[in-house]
Image (tube, grey):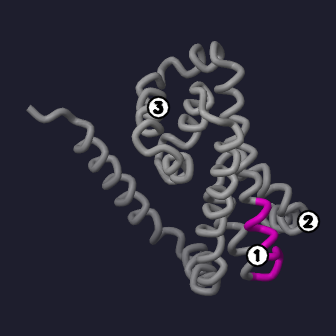
Amino acid sequence: MELHLLELMREYGYGILFIWSILEGESGLVMAGLFSHTGDMNLFMAIAFAGVGAFVGDQLYFYIGRYKKEFVKRKFSSHHRKIALAKALLNKYGWYIIFAQRYIYGMRTIIPLSIGLTGYSAKKFAIINFCSALCWSALIITPVWYFGEPILKMLSVLRAHWYYALPIIFLVIASLYLFIRNRTTPKE
């Protein structure tokens, strides 16, 4: 199974990376960085395909917001606070928020949808979004490519001694849970 998956990635890696970047992104970019390090992908092609995929995904969300307002209001009614926050961020920070939206946890799809709901220029959004998508893909793929050897060694050790990772994973998840709970619990 693992060998079959690796062969698929080697054969269709750019297409998979493109689609993955439309839908989600970061884990696919890490894989692209590792494949670029091993020579199975070209670094610049991986950055380009991932960047264009992220661009296409955000453009889709923008145009859904622009032309399917009733659908967005109905389907994203539980996210009305995030949509209001995204509009407020756009009003306060302007184009900077479009550039930075990929790095704001929980807002990655809401911001393009929300901007689509406004009268913001589609051309201006596309230009900023394209530059942001390429920077985002380069900022993730390039360090993974550069530090590929230590990452691959660490993955090899984790694969051989997977049981050591379980307590670490548990501690990370518990820490994140406690941190988020502490930040979201109202103080008296």
**Within 10 Å of the Cα at label 1, are there few (<14), some (14-19), or many (20+) other Cα atoms?**
some
Residue located beneath label 2 in the image: 11
The magenta region covers 38-49
Residue 30 vertical placement versus 104 (above, below) = below
Q: How far is mark 1 from mark 3, CA to CA?
A: 36 Å
| Dot placed on the residue nearer the N-terminal end, 1 or 3 | 1
Task: Give me the residue at 81% from left, 82% from top.
Answer: 39
- The residue type indicated by label 2 comes to Glu
Q: Secondary structure at mark 2?
A: helix
**Within 10 Å of the Cα at label 2, are there few (<14), some (14-19), or many (20+) other Cα atoms?**
few
- Percent x, y for residue 124? 66, 44
- Percent x, y for residue 69? 64, 18
Extreme-right residue of the structure: 11
Mark 3 and mark 2 in contact (Cβ < 8 Å)?
no
Q: Secondary structure at mark 3?
A: helix
Task: Give me the residue at 64% from left, 26% from top.
Answer: 65
Residue located beneath label 1 in the image: 43
- Percent x, y for residue 105? 47, 47
Q: How far is mark 1 from mark 2, CA to CA?
A: 16 Å
- The residue type indicated by label 1 comes to Leu
Side of 172 relative to 138 (left or right): left
Side of 64 relative to 160 (left or right): right
Pick the front one: 48 or 178: 48
Task: Give me the residue at 47% from left, 38% from top.
Answer: 90
Determine if the magenta segment contains residue 126: no
Total numbered circles? 3
**Tag in front: 1 or 2:** 1
Residue located beneath label 3 in the image: 87
- The residue type indicated by label 3 comes to Lys
Pick the front one: 86 or 91: 91
